[in-house]
Image (cartoon, helix red, strand yellow):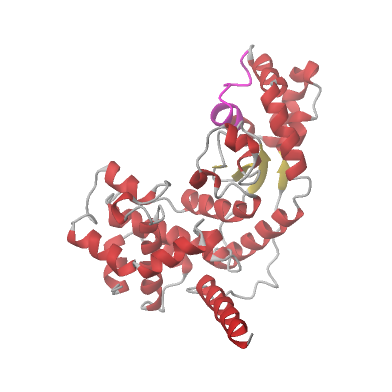
Amino acid sequence: MIKKSCLLCTIIIFLVCFNSCDKHNAPDISKIHVDLKFLRFEQDLFNTDFEKISDSIPFFRKKYGEFFDVFNYKIINIGDYKNPGYPDLLKAFLTDYNTNQIIKEENKYFKNVDTLKINLTNAFRYYKYYFPNLRIPIIITYISGFNHSIVTTDTILGIGLDKYLGTENNFYYQLGLAHYQRYNMHKGKIPADCIRAWALTQFPMSDSANNLIANMIYLGKVMYFTKALLPNNPDTIIFGMSLKNLEWCKKYEAKMWTYLVENKTLFKTDYLTINKFVNDGPYTKDFGKYSPSKAAIWLGVRIINDYMRHSPDINLQALMKENDYLKILRLSKYKP
């Protein structure tokens, strides 16, 4: 009995330590206030009178502004609301059987979004702490027919709630999505996806270098930024990896780096090479079938961690402005 208890304690301590590794020392944000504007576009849209949809267009245009154009052009692809045929196209979307099944499911799964509001508000309180002069986006939820998870502009952060209905949702099986595609399609992943998307929008990658190591370090910065704004989220959520995958990365960190160096992969510029290391998938082919996808980004975060540790004068704001990726690599003194 004592041995079992000790084993259990060891496991618990390991899990806590692993998920806490490289965590930021969260600053005090108790005096920072953020009035986060949170709008439910899908509710306004589906509560309108479908037979008088033309009369509702000025309301949507006035209330949602730029997002209404984004929704029409990029999310459901029906074009300009000024076109004569637009009302019929919007009505067709709203009355489609599958769309209505989706909105019913979304209404059940996201009946209450209070926790999401709280989590995003706190994240942007940290954002305001680190970047006091930058704008806080308007948060707008929508459904897209499974087209887009997150959309952003300079002022808007949109959340496609139908892409977060739970990993075992029947819709995702009907769409034929693989396990690795469904793994992060749950409401707990929304804040991390939002903050990551906002970082990609506000701090775009420099086009001065576009090779694998530059992508690894740039995306490492993005993930470091995400961890800074969501300091209480475990790495399983931040990276979207299982604990087993994170353990694999830690165990094989040196071997992954050695492989990239010895095969002269770090400075390759072709998109096929870059994408297979940083894009989603069942695993990273070059690292073996037991590796997680995007393991190279995990290495990128490790490089950023070392860079920040060896550069005490660099804060998050300075990090996000630094686009000399080789300088970051050099100053990190990274040696797994």
Residue 63 or residue 190, whichever sits in front? 190
Q: Residue furthest front?
A: 1
Q: Position of residue 157 (x, y in %)?
A: 60, 46
Q: Is residue 181 above or below residue 188?
A: above
Horizontally, residue 238 falls left or right of residue 46, namely: left
Residue 319 or residue 287, whichever sits in front? 287
The residue sitting at 63% across, 18% down in the picture is: 82
Question: Which quarter shows the N terminus?
Answer: bottom right
Q: Main secondary structure of the magenta part?
A: loop
The residue sitting at 61% across, 15% down in the picture is: 83
Q: Is residue 278 above or below residue 102?
A: below
The residue sitting at 39% across, 64% down in the picture is: 249
Q: Quadrant of residue 79?
A: top right
Q: Residue furthest bottom?
A: 2
Q: Position of residue 67 (x, y in %)?
A: 62, 36
Q: Is residue 136 visible?
A: no
Horizontally, residue 181 falls left or right of residue 172, namely: left
Q: Position of residue 179 (x, y in %)?
A: 51, 45
The residue range painted magenta reads 71-83
Q: Is residue 310 above or below residue 242?
A: below
Question: Which quarter shows the C terminus?
Answer: bottom left
Check residue 78 for magenta coloring: yes
Q: How many marks?
A: 0
The residue sitting at 49% across, 48% down in the picture is: 201
Q: Position of residue 250 (x, y in %)?
A: 40, 69
Check residue 19 for magenta coloring: no
Q: Is residue 177 visible?
A: yes
Residue 280 or residue 127, whichever sits in front? 280
